[in-house]
Image (cartoon, rainbow, N blue to C red):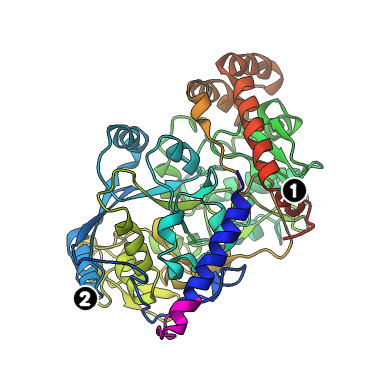
């Protein structure tokens, strides 16, 4: 699997093709690039002028559907908003008709698997690497390789860096288009806290060098917030499956990365793959969380609680330093309460230690193998990322109808642009940028945007290491039974230990025995085998991980 060489060859070919188009008189006012992507090329794509949206395509004029499958629910005026998008596509000569199909979160995994196994027709599938990753979907034959098609879309290819495209590779071919909506320089390791509360309970700054002091800060903050809001605040994960990355920065063995979807493997910077739940690092996690649990800092019903509850409470100011929220709460809390002078910030333990780049791309969009016209998805993405205007129209709706342009990078909505004219209500039209956004064209709501929030969204570390598994996608097709059994056993046996509900020493032995019975050793062997092959095919990976090259 010579994926690195293939990637380089693809970019060289596309760069040459782009240069040819430029020489033939293409409009230089657009945001296309005539050179291969580099670490800075994607970030420089900030033009708001449209570019050629169907470069290199033979088109007989037939309008093909572009049906996009995503998680979530559609906004109240979806039909009106998407009609505006399709009118603009037609005006621009892009012969596709786009529609979005949403699968509710509470049934997403089940319904998505059903769609993929029954061969339901659609064009674009949003891929979340931390939910069902690219290799798992490609291994099912549910999506198609794109290299031969991408040669027709040099402008689209040039929107993303080589590393971002590397995150879209499976079995030596590109199987998706990256979604570059956010910087992923180890955002999982950062916590958000109310700095106004921190100062009121006696800490002038975040005690980033001492876990014991952080726990003390949490306990004092909990008491203060309970008196302030009447709500008992807790420390949270975004999802129960998440790993305590914030703690890992304090360990002597850092840097390392724990795969986040199941937490089964810990990848060390020397390329070693270990069993995380059998590691000393997991033991350290559990000891800290048992201390936190014993002090009432973890919700005793966390394993059964609806995830939305923590976000609803956070809007009221009731959250402790947690690896889940972001600094937008600084403006959200005063809008929902009578609290004043609320300030929030994002922090990390041991800030002098390097950040961990754990993935080159977290979100992608792939072409379904059931699509009647595989190119329609690429045509749409090419159009979407061609200009600020197109990006705004699809994500925010028609300007002045659904949003107000507040200048570069910002927007607002009037009450009339919200459901039931509710000042705190949902927008009448809104399609999530985290599934199809592009950083140079991103806009943020002035109602929730602060400098801290913008820093969080656009952070690019200057002190970082790259995990050896950042570009690696594990194919679980040979261990599907084991993976299913492991997932069930992790929830039943590991989660109570992980959150400190039960003793590590008394329960880890039986839990590991159950994981091994479920197939842990076979899973690890398959992971190590694939990762070894990945390293052999990509010898520069370890040089990057060692910091020799970045």
Span highlighted in magenta in the image: 19-31
| Residue bearing the label numbered 2 | 91
| Residue 533, placed above or below residue 74 | above
Q: Is residue 59 left or right of residue 493?
A: left
The answer to whether the residues at label 1 and label 2 have Cβ atoms under 8 Å apart is no
Q: Residue at x 22, y 63 (%)?
A: 82
Q: Name the foreground residue: 119 vs 469.
A: 119
Q: Name the foreground residue: 297 vs 486.
A: 486
| Residue 411, placed above or below residue 70 | below
Q: Is residue 378 left or right of residue 90?
A: right
User: Overall secondary structure of the magenta stretch?
Assistant: loop
Screen quadrant of the N terminus: top right
- Label 1 – label 2 distance at C-alpha: 49 Å
Q: Residue at x 80, y 57 (%)?
A: 548
Q: Position of residue 350 (x, y in %)?
A: 76, 53
| Residue bearing the label numbered 1 | 542
**Label 2: element kind:** helix
**Label 1: element kind:** helix
């Amino acid at each position: 699997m010579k994926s690195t060489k293939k990637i380089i060859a693809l970019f060289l070919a596309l760069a040459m093709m782009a240069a040819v188009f430029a020489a033939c008189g293409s409009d230089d006012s657009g945001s296309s690039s005539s050179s291969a992507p580099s670490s800075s090329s994607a970030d420089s794509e900030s033009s708001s002028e449209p570019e050629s949206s169907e470069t290199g395509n033979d088109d007989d004029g037939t309008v093909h559907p572009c049906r996009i499958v995503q998680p979530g629910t559609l906004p109240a005026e979806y039909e009106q908003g998407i009609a505006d998008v399709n009118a603009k596509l037609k005006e621009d000569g892009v012969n596709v008709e786009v529609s979005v199909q949403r699968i509710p979160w509470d049934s997403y995994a089940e319904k998505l698997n059903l769609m993929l196994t029954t061969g339901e027709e659609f064009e674009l599938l949003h891929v979340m690497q931390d939910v069902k990753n690219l290799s798992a979907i490609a291994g099912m034959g549910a999506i198609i390789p794109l290299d031969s098609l991408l040669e027709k879309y040099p402008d689209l290819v040039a929107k993303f860096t080589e590393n971002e495209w590397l995150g879209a590779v499976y079995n030596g071919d590109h199987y998706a288009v990256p979604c570059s909506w956010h910087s992923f320089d180890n955002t999982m390791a950062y916590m958000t806290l109310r700095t106004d509360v921190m100062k009121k309970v006696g800490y002038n700054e975040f005690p980033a060098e001492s876990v014991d002091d952080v726990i003390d800060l949490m306990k004092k903050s909990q008491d203060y917030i309970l008196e302030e809001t009447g709500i008992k605040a807790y420390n949270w994960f975004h999802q129960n499956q998440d790993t305590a990355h914030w703690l890992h920065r304090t360990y002597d063995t850092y840097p390392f990365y724990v795969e986040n979807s199941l937490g089964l493997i810990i990848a060390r910077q020397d390329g070693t793959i270990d069993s995380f739940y059998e590691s000393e690092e997991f033991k350290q996690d559990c000891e800290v969380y048992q201390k936190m649990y014993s002090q009432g800092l973890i919700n005793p019903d966390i394993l059964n609680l609806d995830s939305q509850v923590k976000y609803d409470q956070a809007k009221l100011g009731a959250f402790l330093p947690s690896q889940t929220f972001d600094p937008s709460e600084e403006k959200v809390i005063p809008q929902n309460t009578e609290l004043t002078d609320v300030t929030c910030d994002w922090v990390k333990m041991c800030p002098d230690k390097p950040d961990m780049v754990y993935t080159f791309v977290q979100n992608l969009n792939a072409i379904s193998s059931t699509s009647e016209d595989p190119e329609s998805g690429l045509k749409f993405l090419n159009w979407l990322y061609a200009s600020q205007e197109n990006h705004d129209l699809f994500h925010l709706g028609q300007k002045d109808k659904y949003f107000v342009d507040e200048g570069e990078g910002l927007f607002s909505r009037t009450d009339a642009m919200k459901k039931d004219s509710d000042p705190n209500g949902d927008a009448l039209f809104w399609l999530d940028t985290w599934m199809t956004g592009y950083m140079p064209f991103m806009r943020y709501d002035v109602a929730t945007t602060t400098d801290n929030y913008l820093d969080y969204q656009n952070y690019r570390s200057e002190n970082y290491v790259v995990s050896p598994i950042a570009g690696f996608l594990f194919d679980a097709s040979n261990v599907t039974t084991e993976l299913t059994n492991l997932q069930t056993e992790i929830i039943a046996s590991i989660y109570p230990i992980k959150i400190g509900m039960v003793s590590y020493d008394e329960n880890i032995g039986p839990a590991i025995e159950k994981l091994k019975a479920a197939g842990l050793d076979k899973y690890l062997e398959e992971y190590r085998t694939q990762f070894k092959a990945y390293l052999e095919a990509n010898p520069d990976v370890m040089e990057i991980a060692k910091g020799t090259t970045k």
